[in-house]
Image: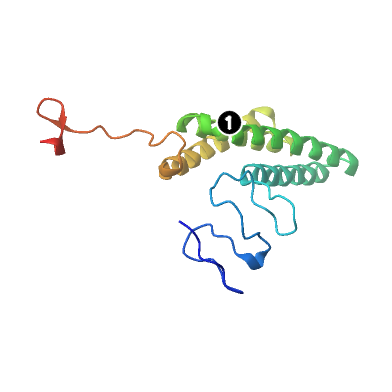
Amino acid sequence: MENPAPRHGARAAGTHGAVEREHGASADAPASGTEPAAAHPRGGRRLPAKVVWPVIAALGFGCYTIWIDHTGGSSGGHAALLGLIAAVVTGALGLVLVHFQSTMITDTRALAYGALFGSSMGWLYNLSGPSVLKSSAWGLVMGAVMFVVSLYIFRGHRVREPHGLHRPRKQHRHGHGTPHGAH
């Protein structure tokens, strides 16, 4: 389907993902969705959400680690170093999890998110002072909560699943193995 010649100042409407000329995009952008990344208005490339969200979560985790360690009595330099290490480790683990999540079945993916979140929260709780046993119990509880929430989200949005439905319905057959509508 060819697009009609653009009029001066007219917006492309009628298809999803159409490029609007006044936002800096070129008129002869490829129509297929095979572009590696969308062009940024300032000329660079925009990072995909698979990278942005784990990095934001890791930065938040690192800042929270700095705050907990510093309010616990550590010096600013020690707290900053610990926060940087925590952000790098959780960010790397989050990026690996997000990268490989499309190869996992739903339950395994939810378990991986629960394990990462639970171990992170248990470690933060331990950093604030309680015993290892209390911190482990807190991490298990938080991991279980994240597992249930992730499982609910992943199963509730089955259309987005890389492997399709978790448990597809079996087709009811009538007669000698022919589907219902084939009679």
Q: Quadrant of residue 174?
A: top left
Q: Quadrant of residue 81?
A: top right
Q: Quadrant of residue 75?
A: top right
**Coordinates of residue 69 in the picture (x, y in percent):** 80, 41
Q: How is the image coloured?
A: rainbow
Q: Is residue 5 above or below residue 117?
A: below
**Coordinates of residue 100 in the picture (x, y in percent):** 58, 31
Front residue (pair 49, 79): 49
All told, the count of numbered labels is 1
Q: Residue at x 54, y 59 (%)?
A: 18
Q: Looking at numbered disc 1 in the image, what kind of residue is underneath it?
A: Phe
Secondary structure of residue under mark 1: helix
Q: Residue at x 89, y 44 (%)?
A: 76
Q: Residues within 10 Å of mark 1 (few under 14, many from 20)?
A: few
Front residue (pair 66, 60): 60
Q: Is residue 4 above or below residue 174?
A: below
**Coordinates of residue 117 in the picture (x, y in percent):** 61, 37
Q: In the picture provided, is 129 more to the left or to the right than 31? A: right
- Quadrant (top left/top right/bottom left/bottom right) for the N terminus: bottom left
Tell me if I can see residue 118 in this picture. Answer: no
Tell me if I can see residue 55 in this picture. Answer: yes
Q: Is residue 176 above or below residue 54?
A: above
Q: Residue at x 25, y 32 (%)?
A: 170
- Quadrant (top left/top right/bottom left/bottom right) for the C terminus: top left
**Coordinates of residue 57 in the picture (x, y in percent):** 67, 45
Q: In the picture provided, is 179 more to the left or to the right than 45? A: left
> Where does label 1 land, which residue?
100
Q: Residue furthest top?
A: 176
Q: Residue at x 62, y 60 (%)?
A: 27
Front residue (pair 143, 132): 143
Front residue (pair 20, 6): 6
